[in-house]
Image (cartoon, rainbow, N blue to C red):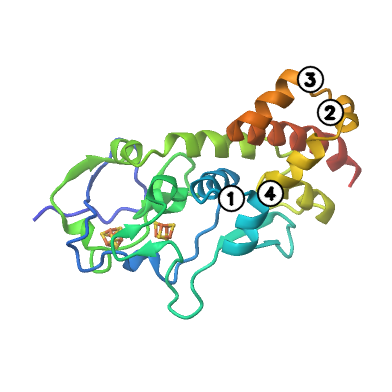
Amino acid sequence: MNENKKISVLEKDDEIFFACHADLPCFTQCCRDVNIYLTPYDVLRMRKSLNMGSTEFLSRYTRSFLAKVTHIPVVQLLMDPDTLYCVFVTPDGCKIYDDRPWACRMYPLDLNVKKPGSYKLITSSDKCFGLKEPQKWNVGNWLSSQGIEPYEEMEKLFQSVMPRGFQPGGKMDAGLGKLLFLAYDTDIFLEMLKDPKFRKLHEIDDDLYKAALENDEKLLKLAFSYIKAQLEELYPLT
Ligand code: SF4
Ligand code: SF4
């Protein structure tokens, strides 16, 4: 029988056996009672899929807060309080499948924080029966098939807004945590952008403004640039 190796570090060219489909008895069980933390790009894709703004999406479908010690924003997808299922799951699968969040795309893999650039299996074949299926992939091809690239690219940009000297897991002033939250709630940033004085002060020219109004990815990238510049200036003062 094909079997996934019980190794904790998977590189992109390592082999996995996996296929997920509706005939498996575990179908949609991984969409129940699960902690899914969203990235700013997840929020953008999901809210667009639902045709709503970021503020409405965040308040209806997430629990968001600044982490107690670090003050880094945390945005967690809410589960249905009665069934514990994700509110987007249907008997046929995810109703926002094309725009499902990064963590859902990666499952049953996740990033391996102990070895950046590598991955790990986060479940086993007694829960996720897809891991017993004969379809063979290498990890890189599997991730590409899940449309992971724009998520990785956007998250890399988001991580790069952190100021010099800030260490992962480090503490940040709560005010700066709120500033970081603008990356999730781009409706608020958009309101700020509408003020000509704000645009002048932050050297956002008309072309850039127009591009951000017309394209959500450009708006998010502009929010990242603004946050980065602000953090660079304010972090050393805190
Ligand atoms: S548990 Fe695994 S195989 Fe089953 S639905 Fe979820 S990802 Fe697919
Ligand atoms: S967003 Fe979709 S794939 Fe992710 S847990 Fe919810 S239903 Fe499942």
Q: Which of the two labelled residues, at mark 2 and mark 4, occupies the earlier sequence position? A: 4
Neighbour class for label 4 at 10 Å: few (<14), some, many (≥20)? many
Which of labels 4 and 1 is toward the front?
1
The local secondary structure at tag 1 comes to loop
Q: Which residue is mark 2?
A: 199
The quadrant of the image that shows the N terminus is bottom left
234 relative position to 6: left or right: right
Residue 115 placed where, x, y %? 47, 45
Toward the front, the furthest residue is 51
Q: Which residue is mark 4?
A: 185
Callout 3–callout 2 Cβ contact below 8 Å: yes
What label does residue 52 carry, if any? 1
Callout 3–callout 4 Cβ contact below 8 Å: no
Q: Which of the two labelled residues, at mark 2 and mark 1, occupies the earlier sequence position? A: 1
55 relative position to 83: left or right: right
191 relative position to 44: left or right: right
What label does residue 205 carry, if any? 3
**What is the spatial separation of the Cα atoms under label 3 and label 4, in whole angstroms?**
22 Å
Neighbour class for label 3 at 10 Å: few (<14), some, many (≥20)? few
Q: Residue at x 66, y 33 (%)?
A: 219
Callout 3–callout 1 Cβ contact below 8 Å: no
